[in-house]
Amino acid sequence: MKKNSFIGVILIYSFLIIGCSPEENGSSPSKVSSNDIYVSQKSGSDESGKGTVNYPYKTITKALKEIVPETNILIEEGEYNEDIGEIFPLVFPKSVDLLKYGDGNGSVLINGFGLTDDEKLVLLILNGKNRINGIDFSSFNNIAILSKSGKNTLNSIRLVNNKNGLGVLNDSKIILKDSFIENNSHTGIELSNNSILKLINSRISKSNIGVYVSDDAIIDSPINSEIIKNSQCDFFTNGSQNLKLQGISWDSDVFDFNIKTDCINGNNIVNIGEGTISYQPISNNLLFSNIKKEILILSPKFSETIYTTEPTIKYTNTQNSKHVMVTLWRNLPRVNDGEIINSKDIIWYWHTGMNNSPVGRVSYKDGAKPINGNLNESIDTLASPIPLEYGRAYYLAIWEWDDYGIDVISSSSISYFIVAP
């Protein structure tokens, strides 16, 4: 198994956490619990408090000493740091939640700004069936949250101004929902070992590296999330798993990315591992959505990585039409009311009027490079095709007209493939 040698902050110091394992008991936390413990930095007391809503504790540290399985620690707005008596790391046993409560509009901030001891590199350690909701974390030169094992849910949290925002180790699975991870000096998120990250409606931005993946870790089917504006690179993997990153938005059209081996200059995707990265959005929509008869693209297959700059394109010709158009695009094809509105993004095309390839199998060299998106050029003036670029992905779309060349009668879905050396 490959180990993280590029960053390694979490892995280097994970040995410090080994002695912190809590008891392995309890079950999934309930939303309402008779074991609720209240904490208030403003009105609580660790000496005279009882952990009730009227007599809360002052620190999370105190609340953790009083917990039983399936406890909700309910924390009021305010800043929780060493100055009020917090002792880091805050180690959460299984089935213990940390939730914001109260009617105030202020934030709950757990701040480990003053941490200097190497044995206190982490603010919060999770050990399974933990739920964190509505909390901000800032630890300056340390790790905000470390998920050590089990399934944990982080909802509506902010990890800002840490060294590493979130570390996910071992076989831990994190669900990160409606959250922001920003301005972390090293990484926003690090995944290692066999860990899993599920991203939902979240943003990772303005850190040195947005997300770093190693070993056999994966990101599981992200939904409507962003990894943008990170200074060195948005995404870096040296792991062994194939990663499907559809559902993530990047800084610009995904075709502007090259999958590189150097994490420099920001806003790029880097792979030095054994696995592959697939980052294009999935589309099952036909190019001409009003057409119900579908052309099936056989090769290159959807999201396939190919190793030639002059591919042969294979497809099923459903209507045996006399008029077929095969196109490659630099950016996402767009059709409105049956009309192509960004034909200038077509970088290669072929049609049956060229009479140089059999229908259903088109050689790249038999196509042409359009001039200013003009697909009606005279065959005598067609520009020779230019080989595709390594490290880029291209959209592929095909359609057929009726025998009169007027109405579109069938269409492929929008597909894409990646060109690799």
Image (cartoon, rainbow, N blue to C red):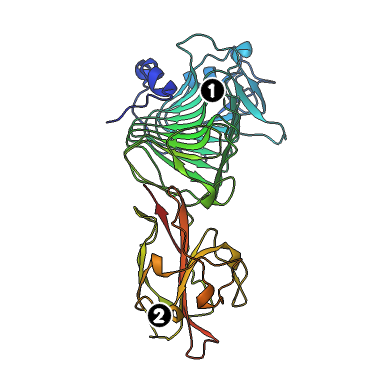
What residue is rendered at 48% in x and 88% in y? 402
- Residue lying furthest left: 1
Front: mark 2 or 1 = 2
Which residue bears the numbered disc 2? 355
Residue 166 vs residue 337: left or right? left
Check the image and report above or below for 241 versus 22. below
Residue 136 vs residue 354: left or right? right
Mark 1: few/some/many CA within 10 Å (<14, 14-19, 20+): many
- Residue lying furthest bottom: 404
What residue is rendered at 38% in x and 73% in y? 296
Residue 46 vs residue 277: left or right? right
Which of marks 1 and 2 precedes in the sequence? 1
Q: Secondary structure at mark 1?
A: loop
Can you tell which quarter of the image residue 304 is in? Answer: bottom left
- Name the disc covering residue 103, or none: none
Tell whether label 1 touches label 2 (CB within 8 Å): no
- Name the disc covering residue 163, or none: 1
- Judge by depth and name the residue closer to the eye, 74 or 222: 222
- The percent position of residue 24, horizontal first and vertical second, equals 33, 27
- Residue lying furthest right: 105
Check the image and report above or below for 421 versus 153. below
Can you tell which quarter of the image residue 416 is in? Answer: bottom left
- The percent position of residue 225, horizontal first and vertical second, equals 54, 47
- The percent position of residue 393, horizontal first and vertical second, equals 46, 54
Quadrant housing the N terminus: top left
